Image: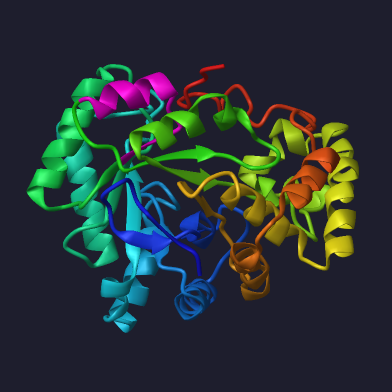
């Protein structure tokens, strides 16, 4: 397993993490046993990073991880755990970066996880009631409290990261990044590299489009997130399947799973990138982890970019509603 660090001075961590949103049933039901089996498999494969958040199933994801830790106490010392807070689910105030709110949310997460600290705590969405410097000051106090070893931001612009970094060393920024969502190439990846910040890439296989078995349109319509998402609506859905079939054909030619190529492509963009796909299927996990074992040549990357050039995706990555919170910067 390839290793990297969370930030310039953070803990060593596998350059691949498991995104635990899937444990909360976001992309279909996931049982506790299935989720625990994925965590067991991650541990055996050398995956040491677990990424979750308090809003994933209203704490369910954290509770599942906590019950796994309870049954595997030694895993607490082996795993680098990240969680997030700042999304309220409240229609009147959807995002809250109040110091008291963030600390109380972290305290609740620690209880669900069954730990006395996490390795990384993110502000899940930046609340513009506060300046980036003020939010970073709050995060620094949480580090000083011992409740988290490092801090991060999620879905922010490079300018926000730079301002926050003046007040507190930000270890990681989480953003959607894949062959289908490439906006971070327009400043965020570069800013993270300059500041020594890890870019944690969520949805690295394009919510299933960059795999051997994408969601069917019917299945996508059964899930809350994808039901109205532009990329899963017709005619965009069929166009995206037709386009990504080219990547699947290339994967067959190269003798690798499509998801492995998608993961390897991300890792090839820089040592400071860390993909965190989610799954509740061990076979799919094996395909994803295979991506960490591939050393793509310059020609391999060029071939991948030729079949999926920048801007190939049909439809925006979010609906207008889903765009509430993430910062657009280009």
Residue at screen point 88% across, 32% down: 235
155 or 167, which is in the foreground? 167
Residue 7 against residue 90 in the figure, above or below: below
- Was residue 41 drawn as part of the magenta stretch in this picture? no
Q: Does residue 312 appear left or right of residue 272 in this picture?
A: right
For the view shown, which residue lies furthest in the front direction? 298
Q: Is residue 109 in view? A: yes
Q: Residue at x 15, y 35 (%)?
A: 100
- Give residue 287's position: percent from left, percent from top: 68, 68
Q: In this rendering, is residue 26 above or below 152?
A: below
Give the camera-side residue of 92 and 326.
326
Point out residue 281 in the picture as x, y percentages from the top left corner.
63, 70
Instruction: Give coordinates of residue 6: x percent, y percent.
Output: 34, 51
Residue 34 placement (x, y as % from top left): 54, 75
- Label total for image: 0
Residue 326 vs 301, above or below: the answer is: above
Question: Taking the image as drawn, is residue 93 in sight?
Answer: no
Among the 4 quarters of the image, the one containing residue 259: bottom right
Image quarter where the C terminus lies is top right
Instruction: Tell me the quarter of the picture where residue 131 sits.
Output: top left
Would residue 77 be found to the left or right of residue 290 on screen?
Answer: left
Give the residue at x 28% y 64%: 113
Q: Judge left or right: residue 118 versus residue 300.
A: left
**What residue is rendered at 40% in x and 54% in y?**
52
Q: Quadrant of residue 93?
A: top left
Residue numbers of the magenta segment: 152-166
Q: How is the image coloured?
A: rainbow
Q: Give the left or right position of residue 37, taking residue 259 as reference.
A: left
Is 153 within the magenta?
yes
């Amino acid at each position: 397993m390839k290793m990297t660090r969370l930030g310039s001075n953070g803990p060593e961590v596998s350059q691949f993490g498991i995104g635990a949103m899937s444990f909360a049933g976001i992309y279909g039901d996931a049982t506790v046993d299935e989720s625990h089996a994925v965590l067991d498999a991650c541990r055996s494969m050398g995956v040491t990073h677990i990424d979750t958040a308090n809003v994933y199933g209203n704490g369910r994801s954290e509770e599942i991880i906590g019950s796994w830790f309870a049954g595997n106490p030694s895993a607490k010392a082996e795993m680098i755990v990240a969680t997030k807070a700042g999304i309220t689910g409240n229609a009147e105030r959807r995002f809250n970066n109040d110091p008291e709110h963030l600390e109380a949310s972290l305290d609740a997460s620690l209880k669900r996880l069954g730990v006395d600290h996490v390795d990384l705590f993110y502000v899940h969405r930046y609340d513009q009631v506060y300046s980036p410097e003020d939010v970073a000051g709050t995060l620094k106090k949480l580090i000083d409290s011992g409740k988290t070893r490092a801090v991060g931001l999620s879905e922010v612009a490079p300018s926000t990261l730079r301002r926050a970094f003046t007040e507190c060393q930000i270890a990681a920024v989480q953003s959607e990044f894949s062959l289908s969502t490439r906006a971070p190439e327009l400043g965020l990846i570069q800013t993270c590299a300059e500041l020594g910040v890890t870019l944690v890439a969520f949805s690295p296989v394009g919510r299933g489009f960059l795999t051997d078995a994408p969601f069917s349109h019917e299945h996508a319509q059964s899930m809350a997130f994808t039901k109205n998402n532009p990329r899963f609506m017709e005619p965009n859905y069929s166009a995206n399947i037709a386009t990504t079939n080219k990547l699947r054909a290339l994967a067959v030619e190269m003798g690798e799973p499509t998801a492995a190529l998608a993961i390897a492509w991300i890792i090839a963009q820089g040592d400071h990138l860390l993909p965190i796909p989610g799954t509740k299927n061990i076979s799919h996990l094996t395909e994803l982890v295979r991506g960490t074992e591939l050393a793509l040549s310059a020609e391999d990357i060029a071939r991948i970019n030729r079949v999926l050039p920048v801007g190939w995706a049909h439809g925006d990555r979010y609906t207008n509603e889903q765009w509430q919170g993430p910062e657009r910067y280009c």
